[in-house]
Image (spheres, rainbow, N blue to C red):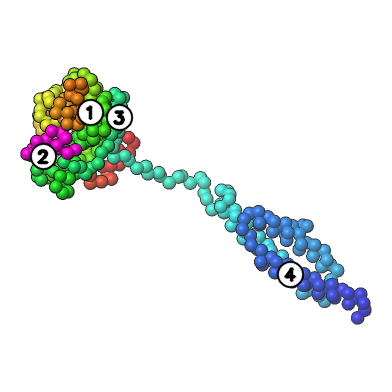
Amino acid sequence: MNATSKKLISFGIAMIEKLKQIQDEIERKILEKAEDAEQFRLTYLSRKGKLNDLFEEFKAIPNDLKKETGKLMNQVKQLAQDKFNAAKEKFEDTSTITSNKYDLSLPAYPFIAGARHPLLLVEKKIVEIFNKLGFSLAYGPEIEDDWHNFSGLNFPDNHPARDMQDTFFIEKDIALRTHTSSVQVRLMENKKPPIRAIMPGRVYRNEAISARAHCFFHQIEGIYIDKKVSFADLKQTLYYFVQEMFGNDFKIRFRPSYFPFTEPSAEMDISCIICKGKGCNVCKHSGWVEILGCGMIDPNVLQDNGINPEEYSGFAFGMGIERITMLKYDVKDLRMFSINDVRFLQQFESE
Ligand code: PHE
């Protein structure tokens, strides 16, 4: 063997070593993002890459080493190509929407929107109407003490509402509030007149559940206390409210009534919106539906809550949100509001 062929053989062996080194390098490379894959392609697969350089040198290798070197060279090239292809596919999947995994011409899935609860819709509407008249919003706790639910509102000690039959007591003198008038007391003790607010909330009474009554329901009450507030102000406020709520196509009447915390007191009826006054189940065939209680705040109540009745007067009113909602949406059974039947609730989807 002459010196030249010896030199060529060692050149071939060196090349095999180099290839093995590159193979090792390729195997170890971690391609974490699209840029890594591109860098990888440039280093190993491009025209100016490491493997292409070796193909040039390959031409000079002696024939009896060509087979082995060529095979290894193709293997390494294939390895690099496979690794690059896999990375490309992985990054293209998430980074391009043109991937043919998605058919953008298909129709979209139907979007099922939730519906607001009808009681909330009506509460929102009532709040909006009174906001326009300058009433702000106030809230209070559902678990109340005797003072805020009864005594501070002039309920005598022996009043039947204090009875276990009507009120859910938690312990002596602590009960689930029976009306949101308790928030009136909280407002009067914390604020100086003028006070003008409405108070929505859930209330509880120990009643048998039926189409017309439930052991929990919702109320909105309102008070207005200032100098020279009169019964005429109360009437005008409530006229405005019912017209905004129901329109003009009905009659209104006030009936004298009694509440311990107002004097004089009244109840307001509207001619039944559902049967147009002809008589139906909702109006108990009377043609009229009672929608709220109201009156001038009793001077004793003002006095007991630190407001001088010589200087200030005020009115209060309270209504059940369920009743208003039944009239507004022609719902004949109060239980529909709490049994969560989607067939009922879905009907309010577009509101
Ligand atoms: N609190 C009364 C009720 O629950 C309603 C009412 C409020 C009456 C304010 C008069 C004044 O029935």
Residue 232 is covered by the magenta coloring: no
| Number of on-image labels | 4
From the image, state whether disc 4 or disc 2 is nearer to you.
2
Kind of residue indicated by mark 2? Ala
Whether residue 291 is visible, yes or no, is no
Q: Do the residues labelled 3 and 2 touch (CB within 8 Å)?
A: no
As helix, strand or loop, the secondary structure at mark 1 comes to strand
Q: Which residue is the site of mark 3?
A: 136
Say which element carries label 2: helix
First reached walking from the N terminus: tag 1 or tag 3: 3
Q: Of callouts 2 and 1, which one flags the residue occurring earlier in the amino acid sequence?
A: 2
- Indicate the amino acid at tag 1: Ile
Residue at position x 66%, y 56% from top? 36
Residue 152 is a magenta residue: yes
The image's mark for residue 161 is: 2
Which residue is more in the foreground, 185 or 233? 185
Spatial CA span between label 4 and label 2: 93 Å
Label 2 crowding class (10 Å Cα cut-off): few <14, some 14-19, many 20+? Answer: some
Q: Label 1 to label 4, Cα distance in Å?
A: 88 Å
Ligand 1 contact, mark 1 (Cβ < 8 Å): yes
Q: Nearer the viewer, residue 226 or 163?
A: 226
The numbered mark, 3 or 2, whose residue comes first in the sequence reads: 3
Percent across and percent down for residue 252 are 16, 23
Residue 234 located left or right of residue 111: left
Which residue lies under the disc numbered 1? 223
Q: In which quarter of the image is residue 110?
A: top left
- Residue 21 is tagged as 4
- Start-end of magenta stretch: 147-162
Callout 4–callout 3 Cβ contact below 8 Å: no
- Residue 33 % position (x, y): 62, 55
The answer to whether the residue labelled 1 contacts the one labelled 3, judged by CB atoms less than 8 Å apart, is no
In the depicted structure, whether residue 183 falls above or below residue 164 = above
